[in-house]
Amino acid sequence: MAYAGIGMLNAICVLGGGALGWLADSAAGTLPLFMLLGLVLGAGLGVAGTRSELRRWR
Protein backbone atom coordinates (compact mmCIF):
# COMPACT_ATOMS: atom_id res chain seq x y z
CA MET A 1 0.00 0.00 0.00
CA ALA A 2 2.92 2.34 0.63
CA TYR A 3 4.07 1.92 -2.96
CA ALA A 4 0.66 3.07 -4.16
CA GLY A 5 1.09 6.22 -2.08
CA ILE A 6 4.47 6.90 -3.66
CA GLY A 7 2.96 6.39 -7.10
CA MET A 8 0.13 8.79 -6.34
CA LEU A 9 2.64 11.32 -5.02
CA ASN A 10 4.58 11.19 -8.28
CA ALA A 11 1.43 11.36 -10.40
CA ILE A 12 0.12 14.39 -8.50
CA CYS A 13 3.47 16.19 -8.73
CA VAL A 14 3.86 15.64 -12.48
CA LEU A 15 0.23 16.31 -13.39
CA GLY A 16 0.02 19.30 -11.04
CA GLY A 17 3.19 20.80 -12.49
CA GLY A 18 1.91 20.29 -16.02
CA ALA A 19 -1.48 21.79 -15.17
CA LEU A 20 0.04 24.84 -13.50
CA GLY A 21 2.39 25.29 -16.46
CA TRP A 22 -0.54 25.02 -18.86
CA LEU A 23 -2.43 27.68 -16.91
CA ALA A 24 0.61 29.97 -16.97
CA ASP A 25 0.99 29.37 -20.72
CA SER A 26 -2.66 30.13 -21.32
CA ALA A 27 -2.30 33.45 -19.52
CA ALA A 28 1.00 34.37 -21.19
CA GLY A 29 0.34 32.92 -24.65
CA THR A 30 3.54 30.83 -24.71
CA LEU A 31 2.02 27.36 -24.97
CA PRO A 32 4.82 24.81 -24.67
CA LEU A 33 7.30 26.76 -22.53
CA PHE A 34 5.81 26.81 -19.03
CA MET A 35 4.03 23.49 -19.46
CA LEU A 36 7.31 21.71 -20.16
CA LEU A 37 8.98 23.56 -17.33
CA GLY A 38 6.14 22.56 -14.99
CA LEU A 39 6.43 18.91 -16.03
CA VAL A 40 10.17 18.88 -15.40
CA LEU A 41 9.81 20.60 -12.02
CA GLY A 42 6.94 18.28 -11.09
CA ALA A 43 9.06 15.24 -11.94
CA GLY A 44 11.87 16.65 -9.81
CA LEU A 45 9.51 17.18 -6.90
CA GLY A 46 8.24 13.63 -7.34
CA VAL A 47 11.78 12.26 -7.16
CA ALA A 48 12.53 14.34 -4.07
CA GLY A 49 9.31 13.18 -2.41
CA THR A 50 10.04 9.56 -3.26
CA ARG A 51 13.54 9.84 -1.77
CA SER A 52 12.19 11.31 1.45
CA GLU A 53 9.53 8.59 1.74
CA LEU A 54 12.06 5.82 1.12
CA ARG A 55 14.42 7.26 3.74
CA ARG A 56 11.75 6.66 6.38
CA TRP A 57 12.01 2.91 5.76
CA ARG A 58 15.78 2.71 6.33
Image (cartoon, rainbow, N blue to C red):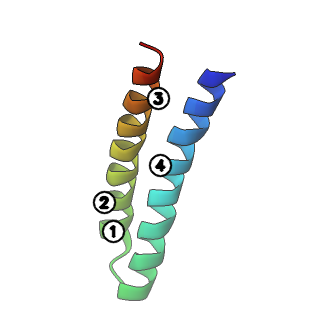
Label 1 vs label 2: CA separation?
A: 5 Å
Q: Which of marks 3 and 4 is in front?
A: 3
Residue visible at 46% across and 29% down in the picture:
53
Q: Position of residue 54 (x, y in %)?
A: 44, 22
Q: Which mark is residue 37?
A: 2
* Label 2 Cα crowd, 10 Å radius (few <14 / some 14-19 / many 20+): some
The reply to whether dot 1 and dot 2 touch (C-beta < 8 Å) is yes
- Name the secondary structure under disc 3: helix
Q: Where is residue 19 in the image (x, y as percent from the top left)?
A: 51, 64
Left or right: residue 39 compared with residue 9: left
Q: Which amino acid does label 3 sit on?
A: Glu
Q: In which quarter of the image is residue 32?
A: bottom left
Contact, mark 2 vs mark 3 (Cβ under 8 Å): no
The amino acid at mark 1 is: Phe
- Which residue bears the numbered disc 3? 53
Quadrant placement of the N terminus: top right
The image position of residue 14, as x and y in percent, is 47, 49
Q: Name the residue under label 1.
A: 34
Distance between the Cα atoms at labels 2 and 3?
Answer: 24 Å
Q: Mark 4 — residue?
A: 14
Q: Which numbered disc flags the more N-terminal residue, 2 or 4?
A: 4
Secondary structure under tag 1 reads helix
Q: Where is residue 39 in the image (x, y as percent from the top left)?
A: 39, 53
The residue at 35%/86% (across/down) is: 28
Q: Look at the numbered discs 3 and 1 and tell me whether their residues touch, using CB distance below 8 Å.
A: no
Residue occupying the point 46% across, 59% down: 18
Query: Position of 54 compared to 1: left or right?
Result: left
